[in-house]
Amino acid sequence: MSATRSTGSVGRRPAPVPGPSEVPQYSYGWAVYVLAALLAFAMAYVIFKLHYTYGQAPHRIIKMLVGFVVLLLVVFRSRLALYVWLLAIPIGEWLPATGIPGVNGPNLLIAVIMLSWIIPRIMQGQRVLSRTRLSGPVAAYLALLVFSLARGWLFPPGPGYDGFQMMKSVWQIVLGFVVYFAVANVVVNRKQISGLLVTFAVGSTIGALIAVRQFLGAGFDARIGGAIGDINDLGAYFAVTASALFGLFLTSRAFTGFRKWVIGASAFLAGFGVMIPKSRGGYVGVAAGVGVITYLIDKRAVVVFAVVLALSPLWAPDFVQERVAETTVDSLEAGLVGDASDRLDPSAGVRLDIWRIVARKSLKSPIIGYGYAAVPYLTVGELSRPFSAHSLYFETLGETGLLGIVVLFWLLSACLRSGRELLRVASTRTSRGLAVAFIGATVALIVANIFGERFTHISIAGTYFFLAGLVDRSIAIEHESSLSNAVGA
């Protein structure tokens, strides 16, 4: 019998029947391109309408488009919000306005930052707020601020006190402080901290370049406010950032290659930036901050720093020397007068008068003061016009009394202790550099605020308390690393 060879499937396993998940599906990748084309068409139409129908200038349209793109990135990549914050805060006054009440750059950024921190923790069943070194003092200061607003609103210090307007001002202050909580709870590791420090340097560089451009355009005799908008606030901002960047630069071995050059260039620009607003408080603040940093890095270098400072008439620009010389009035008439305030230039002399008035009137409400922004109402009857206190400490005394002084002292001393703690436990160059930079920035902030209220401006507070959050997070990472090493051993 002849065997017939089968050409079929004899001896082979039957092909498996595809399951539901293996059935070929239709691809909708083309929809991405369609949506992108529609979005591009919509944006082109918006540009056309804004320019030709509503007469908007091209530079404003570009700002709005850039802001829109950045907002999309931040919404879909929420971790970028921390980096965008550091780039946006130095140019707060230049951020495009939407025209919608409450919808502006800082509000949107802080909303995304807070939501990217809070929502994932709630969804994962984790604690939303971890206990950190500065959480108590910062929260107490914000509570005091709200209390002073309520005190002034319910019991106005004078006629015309607008509680609603003061509330909007307090809200802007709150934004600069609450970023601390997000940073101290969101930042993950040392690599992210290093990246954020470099971004901080880039943000300061952007602010400095804008200020330099304004300065060169206005002339050496002018005083400019940069992208922050106020002369003395700009000086205090650069006093803080220049001190911090100088500390990072002196410990720049924590950074490699291009990052080191970015921090060095940023430190140089911030140092020049503190000169051009011609703010004497900024000058004294940065000198104090850099002096402390020099001491922390090498005590012997303090002598060199003192010599360089003493020789400042040889290297400081003429406009800086002229501004410092204006502190005292060099005239025969002023020399014959015994009152110290009469021997000072008008802007310096009036500060002493204001401080006397605030100190005297605070005796009538020594514990809780007169409420937020009350000092101009205290001075209007005794001086030619209303004046702010021109000092954070007298402003605090007038607004919140001795209670405010205690809370403020608690906050500032806690910041210094956090910096010193990180310096003590630092096991990496990045942590040590951050500790040195933060201590220098804190000293610069404390000294600069003797001569003005520069603590609560959103650009200053938003930058400083961002660094404070990085410091406290670094302390936690150092402790976690030490515990892990101890367990592994």
Image: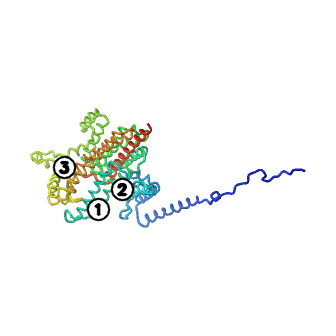
Residue 144: percent from the left, percent from the top? 26, 56
Callout 3: helix, strand or loop? helix
Left or right of 9? Residue 371 is left
Q: In which quarter of the image is the C terminus?
A: top left
Q: Nearer the viewer, residue 207 or 72?
A: 72
User: Residue tagged by mark 3?
Assistant: 348
Residue 138: % across, % down: 30, 52
Query: Are there few (<14), some (14-19), or many (20+) residues within 10 Å of tag 2?
Result: some
Can I make out residue 403 in this image?
A: yes
Q: Is mark 2 on a helix, strand or loop?
A: helix
Q: Are marks 2 and 1 in contact (CB under 8 Å)?
A: no
Name the kind of residue labelled 3 in the image.
Answer: Ala
Number of residues whose C-alpha sits closer than 10 Å to that of mark 1, classed few (under 14), some (14–19) or many (20 or more): some
Residue 424: percent from left, percent from top: 33, 39
Label 3, label 1: how many angstroms apart (C-alpha)? 30 Å
Tell whether 393 sits left or right of 38. left
Residue type at mark 2: give it.
Trp
Q: According to the image, label 1 marks what residue?
A: 167
Residue denoted by label 2:
94
Q: Do the residues labelled 2 and 3 touch (CB within 8 Å)?
A: no
Question: Nearer the observer, disc 3 or disc 1?
Answer: 1
For marks 2 and 1 on the same chain, the one whose residue lies earlier in the sequence: 2
